[in-house]
Image: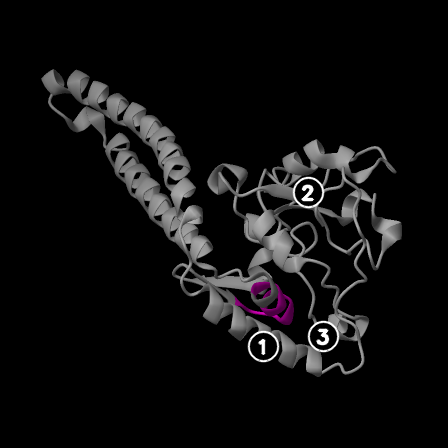
Amino acid sequence: MNSTTSPEVKRDEVPLVVRSVVAPALPYNEYKQPLRRDFFHSCAYCTMSEAEAQAIRFTIDHYEPRGSRPDLENVYDNLMWACDECNRRKGNRTPPAKAREDGLRFFRPDTDVYTEHFHRDGSTLISDTNTGWYSLEALDLNREALCRLRDLRMRLTECDAAVTAGILAISHFPIDRLPHHIRGPAIRAIQQLKDARNHTIDAIEEVLRDHAKSPYLDDDPAAPERGADRARKLKQAEALYPGLDWRAPRKTPSAKSAVG
């Protein structure tokens, strides 16, 4: 998501989010619009976009919960744009310092490189670090809706790549090798294919919007079993640091406050 990446730096080697310079010390709710823009209207944790979410609400999340770090409540760098599903699962979790030293913390798209912590096996997200593991388990990043979304994205990407490859092969064909009487029709046909590709890109975006709506409203029959498994794994991780709190004190938000 970093539009300033130089040609020498691959996009998957830099953080996904680059933050804007904003006025300091505003009430955090006033940062909503620049936050949405900086996060490309997508969830900081599961990457689902607002357009893909449709019925799922997006909210401002405090990376460090307000209950444990009230001094960061209105600090822009502590704010994340998150879907309600991830925000609800994250809640007031705040791993203790000792656990963070071992990498057990939430992934941050504004400072962490995504591909260093995760990779995909088909539509399933696999963690490569303790940070990736903790984020995946605590936020349930392999919930059914997200797996469906990754599968859809993958199929659409493959479709676009195939169309592009075919058009490039045709457009690079040496027209001067064709008989003179069919050069004109061939040039027009190639242009029509290029136009068709542009229409295909628009159609893919529309398909993504259409298909992103219903999956999140469907039931997730495996959720209870997966939830119990996640709870067991997280409890095992927390047991390695006895006597330390893993949740911030709950702070009752005002009526105008967002979740997070």
Label ID, residue 233: 1
Given the image, on which type of amino acid does mark 1 rest?
Lys
Viewer-side residue, 131 vs 194 = 131
Within 10 Å of disc 2 (Cα), the crowding (few <14, some 14-19, many 20+) is some
Total numbered badges shown on the rendered structure: 3
> What residue lies at 70% left-to-right and 53% top-to-bottom?
111
Q: Is residue 233 left or right of residue 147?
A: right
**Label 2: which secondary element:** loop
Do the numbered discs 2 and 1 sit on residues whose CB atoms are within 8 Å? no
Whether residue 128 is in magenta: the answer is: yes
| Residue occupied by mark 3 | 102
Can residue 48 be seen here? The reply is yes
Position of residue 200 measured from the top left corner of the image (x, y, whole percent)? 32, 31
Q: Which of marks 2 and 1 is in front?
A: 1
Position of residue 201 measured from the top left corner of the image (x, y, whole percent)? 37, 32
Whether residue 12 is in magenta: the answer is: no
Q: Mark 2 or mark 1: name the one nearer the start of the chain.
A: 2
**Label 1: which secondary element:** helix
Q: Mark 1 or mark 3: name the one nearer the start of the chain.
A: 3
Within 10 Å of disc 1 (Cα), the crowding (few <14, some 14-19, many 20+) is some
> What residue lies at 59% left-to-right and 73% top-to-bottom?
231
Q: Alpha carbon of mark 2 to alpha carbon of mark 1: how far?
A: 32 Å
Q: What stretch is highlighted in magenta?
A: 127-136
**Label 3: which secondary element:** loop
> What residue lies at 31% left-to-right and 43% top-to-bottom?
159
> What residue lies at 55% left-to-right and 49% top-to-bottom?
47
